[in-house]
């Protein structure tokens, strides 16, 4: 009986698909010479022999897409594609030379040609005129990609992986598309289960279930154990990884993984899923995909250098990347036959997003904040606070406690400048440990604002960049559209603050930094748990002329928190890897106000300004007391149901 019912569903889905494709064909003018339509991930692709006829009238595709409520892509059929060598010549003739083309790749599997350029706007042309010209003359569908203004090995590697694995990705996306575009099954309930990051910071993960769908939002690692390469089957895994096993969740049952942003406490466990059999899609924004490649591969190297065994290998990260489907802000995407995903700016790091999920035909809507900033930063606009509908809000609470009020940015930068000037005047060095993604770029912009004009006169102190800071900054220059308008314009006009003359890159020659006089060291490893910052700290800690200046969060068990709390001696590995005692005599300073997280006032302001107002609020991503306190406050303030779930709590949302 079950098999019969299954066959019946397959027949119904097949008929539904045929009717949908026939509808698309009927809405196309005959001169386009329609050949076929097929699903490709969440999108529908139509292949025609005369794409020029479609490009001459944009209304055709807009009208069809609005009618079927799907993203529609038009491509020239493979039978009419111009030979790549000849098409290459035409592309170079059509695209202005000042576009700065760096690479052109033809992907016959998708009937697409990718054009990488320093100025992709010139590749696109006004109203897409240049792209349309390429398509009309070659029948290849052109895609423009931005070449970063700073060389990025990560972006080069990720794009080459996508090109080289085009055949696999085509088959993968086609299979995913068939699963997504089934007849919509009506669900009677929606359940959320906290798998990690509730009443704690780290290993963030939330499972959402209906009778027909299972998806997880984020799947991260906790900061301290993950650095040591904990065995996933050991007792330490109870604190390091999401509770996937405890939730009786089979990896093969998952329909999708949704990522909010690229920090390890949100993405660090995803390659492990692929190592043990997950073959489904991972959704994220384009910058999140590239930053994830950078940070996940760095995690592997960091654990290996510390003598541990990583949870997964680089091949697992590559597998994750080839299963990634990127989506821009405000792009509505079906991720199952009953769940629609829309990303919105979260203002936390490059590409960070809040998640809006629409379940069923208006059954339920929820917003997951990820990590968010609802306040001023030099990098990003504030988190979006307007949505079509919100039944439940899951909101981060990192700085949601009653006393978590951070100084405004102007005051913070004043303290930063005073501390730097005082240390340099005393002949010392200032070490600023930073997270490579987000905090480092924020501090770089502040330093460039402080000392940029002095650099021209030769009066600025040197600012040394070490670790992944430079590579992460390069990725920022590939996605200026995700940055604040003023910063976007600087990058587009070749005035990127990340390439300011005040910065000096350290390339494996740290001894020169120690030999030189006073200056500022911006090094990755924000919590001193590893990375470049730990080596600098070991060498600078004993000298009272130096200062370590924290500008971000240090988790409870981190080395950074111990130093902040005033410990006078720690054991650190020397050049040979042997633990040796290190006395801490340098000045320890914390400057609040640079965080990519909202403080309590900003969190409350965000919820007050949310439109529409949520009916239920659940706090997460904060220490236990902080989550409970914020939940109580928001509940009283808005007169709505508000609570702080614990890990493994299941909540029936509908």
Image (tube, rainbow, N blue to C red):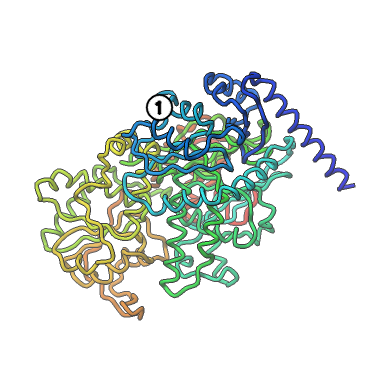
Badge 1 local density, few (<14 within 10 Å), some, or many (20+)?
some
Residue 565 in which image quadrant: bottom left
In this figure, what is the number of numbered marks?
1
Q: Nearer the viewer, residue 341 or 181?
A: 181
Q: Position of residue 156 (x, y in %)?
A: 42, 51
Judge left or right: residue 547 versus residue 395. Answer: left
In the picture, which quadrant includes the C terminus? top right
Judge left or right: residue 581 versus residue 85. Answer: left
Q: Is residue 549 visible?
A: no
Report the residue at 63% width, 56% height from top: 278
- Dot 1 lies on which element? loop
Q: Is residue 509 visible?
A: yes
Q: Nearer the viewer, residue 590 or 405?
A: 590
* Residue of label 1: 125
Report the residue at 65% width, 61% height from top: 246
Furthest-right residue in view?
1
The vertical placement of 392 against 440, above or below, is: above
Residue 270 in which image quadrant: bottom right
Q: Position of residue 282 (x, y in %)?
A: 57, 48
Q: Position of residue 485 (x, y in %)?
A: 33, 33
Q: Position of residue 221 (x, y in %)?
A: 50, 60
Report the residue at 30% width, 69% height from top: 535
Judge left or right: residue 142 versus residue 6. Answer: left
């Amino acid at each position: 009986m079950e098999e019969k019912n299954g066959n019946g569903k397959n027949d119904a889905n097949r008929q539904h698909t045929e009717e949908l494709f026939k509808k698309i064909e009927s809405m196309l003018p005959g001169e386009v010479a329609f050949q076929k339509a097929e699903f490709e991930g969440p999108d529908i692709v139509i292949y025609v022999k005369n794409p020029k006829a479609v490009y001459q009238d944009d209304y055709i595709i807009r009208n069809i897409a609005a009618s079927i409520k799907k993203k529609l892509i038009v491509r020239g059929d493979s039978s009419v594609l111009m030979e790549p060598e000849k098409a290459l010549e035409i592309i170079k003739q059509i695209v202005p030379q000042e576009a700065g083309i760096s690479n052109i790749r033809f992907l016959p599997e998708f009937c697409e040609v990718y054009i990488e350029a320093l100025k992709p706007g010139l590749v696109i042309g006004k109203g897409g005129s240049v792209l349309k010209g390429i398509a009309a003359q070659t029948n290849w569908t052109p895609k423009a990609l931005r070449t970063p203004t700073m060389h990025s090995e990560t972006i080069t590697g990720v794009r080459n992986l996508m090109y080289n694995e085009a055949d696999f990705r085509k088959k993968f996306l086609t299979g995913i598309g068939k699963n997504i575009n089934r007849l919509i099954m009506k669900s009677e309930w929606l359940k959320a289960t906290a798998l990690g990051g509730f009443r704690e910071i780290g290993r963030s993960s939330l499972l959402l279930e209906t009778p027909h769908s299972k998806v997880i939002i984020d799947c991260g690692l906790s900061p301290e154990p993950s650095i040591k390469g904990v065995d996933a089957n050991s007792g330490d895994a109870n604190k390091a990884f999401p509770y996937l096993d405890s939730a009786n969740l089979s990896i093969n049952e998952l329909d999708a993984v949704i990522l909010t942003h690229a920090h390890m406490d949100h993405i660090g466990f995803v390659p492990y899923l692929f190592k043990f059999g997950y073959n489904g899609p991972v959704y994220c924004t384009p910058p999140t995909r590239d930053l994830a490649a950078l940070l996940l591969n760095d995690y592997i190297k960091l654990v290996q250098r510390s003598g541990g065994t990583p949870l997964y290998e680089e091949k697992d990260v590559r597998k994750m990347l080839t299963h990634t489907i990127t989506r821009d802000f405000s792009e509505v995407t079906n991720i199952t036959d009953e769940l629609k995903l829309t990303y919105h700016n979260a203002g936390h790091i490059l590409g960070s997003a809040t998640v809006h999920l629409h379940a069923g035909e208006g059954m339920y809507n929820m917003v997951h904040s990820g990590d968010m900033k609802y306040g001023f930063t030099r990098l990003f606009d504030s988190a979006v606070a307007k949505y079509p509908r919100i039944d439940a809000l899951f909101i981060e609470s990192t700085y949601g406690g009653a006393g978590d009020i951070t100084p405004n940015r102007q005051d913070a930068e004043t303290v930063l400048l005073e501390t730097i000037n005082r240390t340099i005047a005393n002949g010392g060095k200032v070490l600023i440990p930073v997270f490579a993604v987000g905090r480092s770029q924020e501090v770089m912009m502040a330093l460039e604002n402080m000392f940029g004009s002095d650099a021209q006169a030769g009066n600025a102190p040197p600012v040394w960049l070490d670790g992944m800071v430079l590579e992460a900054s390069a990725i920022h220059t590939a996605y200026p559209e995700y940055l604040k308008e003023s910063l976007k314009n600087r990058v587009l006009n070749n005035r990127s603050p990340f390439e300011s003359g005040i910065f000096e890159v350290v390339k494996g020659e740290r001894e020169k930094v120690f030999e030189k006089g006073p200056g500022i060291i911006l090094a990755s490893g924000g919590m001193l748990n590893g990375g470049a910052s730990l080596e600098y700290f070991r060498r600078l800690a004993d000298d009272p002329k130096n200062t370590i200046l924290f500008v971000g969060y240090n988790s409870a068990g981190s080395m950074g928190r111990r130093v902040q709390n005033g410990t006078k001696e720690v054991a650190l590995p020397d050049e040979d890897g042997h633990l040796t005692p290190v006395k801490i005599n340098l000045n320890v300073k914390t400057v609040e106000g640079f965080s990519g997280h909202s403080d309590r006032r900003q969190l409350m302001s965000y919820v007050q300004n949310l439109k529409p107002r949520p009916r239920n609020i659940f706090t997460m991503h904060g220490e236990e007391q902080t989550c409970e306190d914020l939940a109580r406050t928001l509940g009283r303030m808005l007169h709505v149901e508000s609570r702080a779930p614990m890990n493994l709590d299941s909540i029936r949302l509908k």
